[in-house]
Image: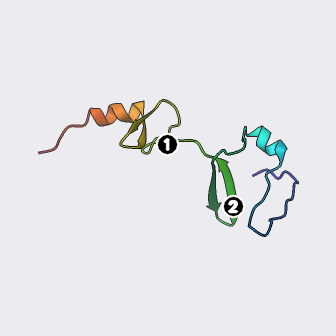
Amino acid sequence: MKSTGIIRRMDELGRVVIPIEIRNQFNIVEKDPIEIYVDGSSIVLKKFEPNCIFCGNTKNLLTYNNKLICENCSKKIGSLKKNN
């Protein structure tokens, strides 16, 4: 991880403002969903990207039963044979 040298204080509601330079760098705008991860002793913020529930791919997504599946996984599922 690269340090930015920017320090922000958390407010009384637990909010922290992400500096405009970082928002611009990652193309984050107002109302964008942000994922929050814990990695060891670090808190990681990441702009949310919808992805395939099977492989994590973010390109060429299809919706099936309100779940996202990429075209490649969809083809693999379509080729499955039933075991008797």
Q: Nearer the viewer, residue 81 or 66?
A: 66
Mark 1 or mark 2: whose residue is earlier in sequence: 2
What SS does tag 1 mark? Answer: loop
| Residue that numbered label 1 is attached to | 56
Vertical position of residue 22 compared to residue 38: above or below: above
- The residue located at (74%, 66%) in the rendering is 14
Mark 2 neighbour class, 10 Å CA radius: few under 14, some 14 to 19, many 20 or more = few
Q: Quadrant of the C terminus?
A: top left
Q: Amino acid at mark 1?
A: Gly
| x, y percent for residue 32 | 66, 44
| x, y percent for residue 8 | 85, 59
Q: Amino acid at mark 2?
A: Ile
Mark 1 neighbour class, 10 Å CA radius: few under 14, some 14 to 19, many 20 or more = few
- The residue located at (25%, 37%) in the rendering is 80
- The residue located at (73%, 40%) in the rendering is 26
| Residue that numbered label 2 is attached to | 43
- The residue located at (64%, 61%) in the rendering is 39
Q: Is residue 41 left or right of residue 80?
A: right
